[in-house]
Image (cartoon, helix red, strand yellow):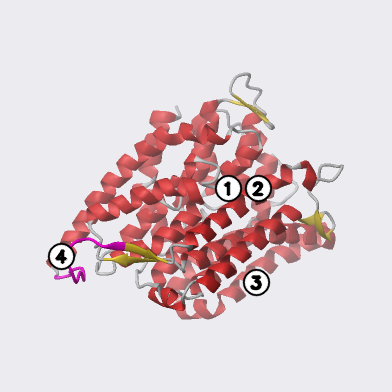
Amino acid sequence: MSTSIPLWLCLPFAGLLLSIAIVPLVAGEWWEKHRVHAVIFWSLLFIVPFTAMYGPLKASETVLETVFNDYLSFIVMLFGLFCVAGNITFEGDLAGSPLVNTLFLLIGTFLSSLIGTTGSSMLMLRPMIKINSWRRQKRHIMIFFIFLISNMGGCLSPLGDPPLLMGFMRGVPFLWSLHLLPILIFNLVILLTVFWQLDKHYYLKDVKLGYRPDISKPGTELSLRGAHNILFLLMIIVAVVLGGTLPGNPMFQTAEGTVRGIHIVGEVVLGFPTIIEIVLILAAAFLSFKTTPEEIRRTNHFTWGAIQEVAELFIGIFITMQPALIILKEMGPKLGITEPFQMFWSTGLLSSFLDNTPTYLVFLTTAGTLGMTSGLTTTVGTIPVIFLKAISCGAVFMGANSYIGNAPNFMVKSISDENGIHMPSFFGYIGWALAFLVPVFVIDTLVFFL
């Protein structure tokens, strides 16, 4: 199975991931000051040989296509949600207990399908941190937060996670994702039961050590300050949906069927739908800051550190992952993947470290080329429902396997670290995923995909 891209061009991507995983552990202070230089180093280690092999035009098109049509909309969306959610603060005397934390995770999980995993994560994260501020042991809370709210909860609608939006654009009915509800509930029962027991264990240890919540008055009084920002949050969700659906509108297409936009270089075009999405998101962030008192941001301990870290790291990740994505697109139909469980694990494992949207599209296209005669009719072919379930669950669920598997994962880690919750290292987090998520995925395979 030869490809036009040599495998060794994937080494810069692997090198950057290893840098993210190892360097903060052995040289944390250096990493804080020089991580942007590490990103530049690994990016150039891909760009320079790629340019030498394929020429300046091909290299420019590859890099600029990634920057303008993948990374730009990605980071602007994160920036907008980060800003708007930072202007909403939870107030009340609710204390983080196993029951309260489990209910928060349950609510946030279903909210993710309505406003997206990133939107739900940014909205629920600071309240979750605040109600558990009295706790000593709380990293497990944020880890299960990533498992459920930042990933699994996005499976029930195209609004929940970008891969499902891409499926909708290729003919998958909007409400089809509700077919995944039994699988989500099945996984929720398992994971929330495990979380309840784990959180109860740490909760009792904290209480035994003398930790107590600071509740000044009896009863439960809850309120949201800056609640008007929910409108700006919805404005961002609408912008993201428009950015995904407008390219298919004839008004935004040329006679050749390509998306209209601003020409950058070669065949790279910054599409008008992407520009509309970016303008709407930045307008929402601006209006959020203009209409919200600074006191709320101070209450939330709002800083720019988390979004800066994500912006610096993910520009390198997006650029250096290109050889791996190119190879995957070329090899996808030749991999001999013809069973639902193979679709589930192939899509999922690659989505753990690569962008889950192109990974989903690769295997959706692969399923469409198998020549099936029954199932959903899409623009890429007829796909059996069981195959579509497997691909969708793999892309959405297994994004939780690593910090870089889905957009909000690293953001949750960074904000948690900023607030004094010492999250696991890159490999440490994968260890949690192996211990708690992978067994659930094995059970999913046996129950739903064999």
How far apart marks 4 and 3 lie (CA) works out to 47 Å
Q: Which amino acid does label 2 sit on?
A: Gly
How far apart marks 1 and 4 lie (CA) works out to 41 Å
How far apart marks 1 and 2 lie (CA) works out to 8 Å
Q: Pointers 2 and 3 in contact (CB under 8 A)? A: no
How far apart marks 3 and 1 lie (CA) works out to 27 Å
Q: Is residue 213 magenta?
A: yes
Range shown magenta: 210-222
Secondary element at tag 1 = helix
Which residue does the numbered mark 1 point to in the structure image?
162
Q: Pointers 1 and 4 in contact (CB under 8 A)? A: no
Which residue does the numbered mark 2 point to in the structure image?
244
Query: Which corner quadrant holds the N terminus?
Result: top right
Q: Pointers 1 and 2 in contact (CB under 8 A)? A: yes
Residue at the right extreme of this rendering: 255
Image spot of residue 17 (x, y percent): 54, 62
Eyeballing the image, is 94 above or below 398?
A: below
Q: Which amino acid does label 3 sit on?
A: Ile
Which residue does the numbered mark 3 point to in the structure image?
40
Q: Name the residue nearer the viewer: 351 or 276.
A: 276
Q: Is residue 424 magenta?
A: no
Q: Name the residue nearer the viewer: 401 or 222.
A: 222
